[in-house]
Image: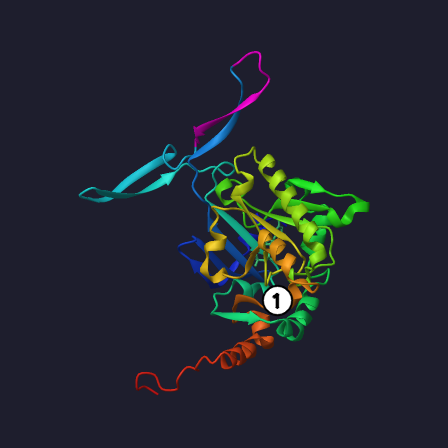
Amino acid sequence: PTINDLIKRFKFTRILDSNPRMKIISLLGSIDNEDAIITVEKTHFIFDENVRRPSQDKNSQETIIYHVENEYSCIGGIEELKQLTSNDIYYWGLSIIKQDIVQNPTAKINLIWPANYVHIRRYDQQHLHLIRETPETYKEVVKPYVEEMSTPEKLKWVYDILYENSETSRVIYKDYEDDRKKSSFVILPDTRWDGVNLDGLYLVALPYRDDIRTVRDLRPSDRDWLIELNRKFRSIVPACYNFSVHADELKIFIHYQPSYYYFHFHIVNLKHPVLTDGSLVGKAILIEDAIDHLKTLGPEGYMARSLAYAIGESHELWRRGLKDEVGKQMKRDGIPEIPKVLNGFE
Ligand code: M7G
C-alpha cells in the first residue's frame, strides 16, 4: 500500500505529542485494527536558492552559481496577506504562501504502520530524567537490551537499504566493495528531512561494518576509521548539494542511546535545531569528540567511560534498571531526597 491509501483508513485514538515550537504533532490511531503513528511536521520556509547557469562568457564552458529569490519565497510567494493589527511601528497579519507538492510542500507526514510498543513509547510525550551510565550499569542493564534490540528483524529497514535496494533512488552516495566491507557505507536522506529545504538537511550514513552496535563498542583501533569517514562525509555531502552547504556547516554525530542499535551517523546542517533541543543534551556525540576521546581513553575505549544523557520514563531501559540506578547515584552523590512534606502540605 502507499501512504495515501493508508492515511485514508487511519482511525484516530489520541494525541501522543504536540510541539508548537517545532510545529510538529504525533497522533496514535489504527489502520485495519493495527496501531499506527502519524507525525505531521510543517516544513520550513524558503527565501532564496542557488541556481546553476552557463557562463555568459562564450569561451567558457563553466557553469556559474547565481543567488536568486525562490519562486516559492516566503515573501515573493505570498498569495494572500491579511493584516490583523498594527500598533505604532509594529504590524502583524496572516498569510497564505504559494505551495507546491514538489517545490514547496506544506508539511511532511511520516507514518509507522504497523507500529509496535517501542515505537509508541518513543513518540509518547514523557517525563525525562538525567542518567549517568557507568561501565557497570552498561554491562548489567544496557548491554542485554542492546543485544535484544540488534537482531536483523529489529533492524530490517537498515539491512533493506544496505542489501535489498530499499530507498535506492534516494541514496545520494554509495561506497561499497565486497573486499573492503569495513570501509564501505551509504549516505541517504533521513526520514526526518523533507528533502527540499537545505537549511534542514538531515542525512543518515550507514556503514556496512556491523560489528559495532553503539559508541560503547568503539575502541582506539576504530579511530582511523572514524577519521576517514569524517573526511569522506565532509567531502561528499557538499558536492552532492552543489556546495550550497559547506563542509564546516555540517554536524556529524552519533546518538546514545539511539533508537536503532545498528551503528550509524547523523549528518545534519548546523542550522538544524537538533543539538539545541535541551532534552537531547548528552544524547548526541560529535564525531570529532569521539575521535578525540579515543586518543586518551585507553584500550577499552568507550567501554571505560561514564556517559550522561537524558532518558524518558517510557523508555524500556528506564524500567529495566536505569530508574533504580538514578536513585542509587543520587544517594551516593549525597543529593538529598525530595522531602515528604512540602511547604507544610502532606
Ligand atoms: P537513532 O539515533 O537510532 O534514533 O537514528 P533517533 O535519532 O530517532 O533517536 C536513527 C535515524 O534513522 C533517525 O534519524 C531516523 O529518522 C532514521 N530512520 C529511521 N527509519 C526507520 C528510517 C528509514 O526507514 N529510512 C531512512 N532513510 N531513515 C530512517
Which image quarter is the C terminus in? bottom left
Q: How many residues crowd mark 1 within 10 Å: few (<14), some (14–19), many (20+)?
A: some
Residue found at x 69% / y 49%? 161
Residue found at x 65% / y 45%? 187
Point out residue 76 in the picture as x, y percentages from the top left corner. Answer: 37, 32
Image quadrant of residue 215? bottom right
What residue range appears in magenta? 57-71
Q: Give the labeled residue for mark 1.
A: 305
Question: Type of residue at label 1?
Answer: Arg
Front-most of 10 and 21? 21
Residue 197 visible in the picture: no
Point out residue 37 in the picture as x, y percentages from the top left corner. Answer: 54, 59
Tell me, yes or no, whether the highlighted magenta stretch contains residue 58: yes
Position of 279 with respect to 295 (left or right) is left
Tell me, yes or no, whether the highlighted magenta stretch contains residue 72: no
For label 1, being within 8 Å of ligand 1 is answered no
Position of 252 with respect to 335 (left or right) is right
Point out residue 80 in the picture as x, y percentages from the top left corner. Answer: 33, 37
Looking at the rendered structure, the secondary structure element under dot 1 is: loop
Image quadrant of residue 147? bottom right
Position of 85 with respect to 313 (left or right) is left
| Outermost right residue | 179
Picture colour scheme: rainbow
Q: Disc count in the image?
A: 1
Residue found at x 47% / y 81%? 334
Position of 343 with respect to 225 (left or right) is left
Residue found at x 58% / y 55%? 289
